[in-house]
Amino acid sequence: MQIIFKYLFVVVALLLAPLKSMAGSFKDQIAVSYSTYSDNVGVKIFSPAISLQKKLSEHWGLSTAFAIDAMTAASIRNGNGKVKDGVIVDAVSGASGRAGFDDFRVAPTVSLTYENDDFSANFGTYYSGEIDFDTIAGFASVTNGFNDANTIVSIGGSYELAEWSPTTNRVLIGGLNDDPSGAKSQVQVNASVMQLINPTSYLQLRYSYINQEGYLSSPYRYLVSDTVAQFDRYPGVRTSYATALQYVTQLGEDFSAHAEYRYYADNWDVQSHTVQGQLFYDLMHNLMIGTRLRVYNQSKSSFTKKINEYEYDDAFIVSDYRLSAFQSIDTGLSLSYRPGFFPDENMAIEMTYDWFTTDENAYIENWYGETQIKAEYATISLSYAF
């Protein structure tokens, strides 16, 4: 499940840096949150987290965060749709007998922020440790405002090292130069430009580049079909590019709208289009509700075939639906409330709920025994500025 969660803090820190600059100076703040995820293929995730921001001086601030993910039916318990005693069985690892949570992830993050007028810089490190997968990364970003802060430019990047330590005793063939270590690296660069159009609307253009090298598949995924029974094998290099354009406007005194389009492409010939819209309404001066809709469409990779067309000597084997052609829809609701129990309304409570579903997909059915994935996830967070 590291695929879902491991980049969250870094992505937020880098891509939303321009919005932070508009929000004002660095604040002393503590926040706690609790997130849950569950789907119809047996995956459940429970994730508490805590973060702390502390202003160290006029220009410097420290941010720390610590998250825990407790996961059931994670990477070591999947298994080609075969069910035994109500549990999806991994016939290769023999993990079907595991009791309790299948995986447990800890993820601390530490960063420093420097702010001086319209200029800010942020740099830090991130670690994620699971039973069978470890990641360490460093990241940095700089942001500067021009034209009386009506134009804000941000650029950031991260470098990540990760390595599998699978519960199965097998050689992880398929990485860069068939390196059996299960290691991989990632370089990511993000850039954004935000332009204030008028006092109530702005445009933001974002660009992202990612280069991954090493063992890029999962050591547990394998394809069983009429023609082959093989572990997944992917190319050892993946380079991707993404561009997004977001428009935010205030439609009335209490009503605002966000619209975004994102295009993605990589050297595996995967292309995707994402359209997202959000509406927010201030019911009261301290209560805001929101709704959103996200539609995603993706093409298959150049080496993804129909399931029964793979052959034993194929260079690449795929069982993961995320390299096939599929569509998904995500709808969500949000609520933000500032109770005002403290001076200046320093406390905020935020809640979100989302419903996610894919279209019917042969790869999903082959692996999970279900024709599509249906999931729901929610977060509740409490923050206090002091």
Image: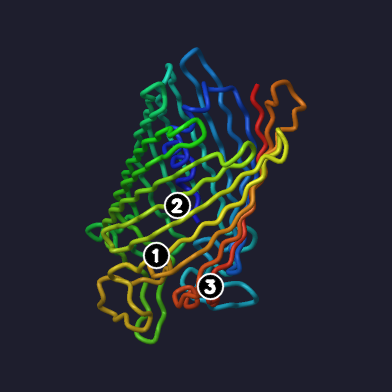
Instruction: Please name the amino acid that badge 3 sits on.
Output: Gln
Vertical comparison of 226 with 31: above or below:
below
Mark identifier at residue 307: none
Residue 269 visible at all:
yes
Residue named by callout 1: 298
Q: Residue at x 65, y 45 (%)?
A: 34
Label 2, on which residue? Answer: 133
Q: Is residue 97 left or right of residue 1?
A: right
User: Circles 2 and 3: CB distance less than 8 Å?
Assistant: no
Q: CA distance from mark 2 to mark 1?
A: 27 Å
Report the residue marked by disc 3: 372
User: In the rendered view, would you say 34 is above or below 371?
Assistant: above
The amino acid marked with disc number 1 is Gln
The residue located at (37%, 62%) in the rendering is 217
Q: Earlier in the sequence, mark 2 or mark 1?
A: 2
| Lower sequence index among marks 2 and 3 | 2
Label 1 to label 3: alpha-carbon separation: 15 Å
- Classify residue 268 as left or right of residue 152: left
Residue at x 29% of width, y 49% of height: 211
Give the amino acid at mark 2.
Phe
Question: For this view, does 10 lie left or right of residue 232?
Answer: right
Q: Nearer the viewer, residue 310 or 249?
A: 249
The x, y position of residue 219, in whole percent, is 40, 63
Where does the C terminus fall, quadrant-wise?
Answer: top right
**Picture coordinates of residue 222, whole percent (x, y):** 41, 72
> Which residue shows up at 69% across the image and 29% down it?
347
Q: Residues within 10 Å of mark 3 (few under 14, many from 20)?
A: many
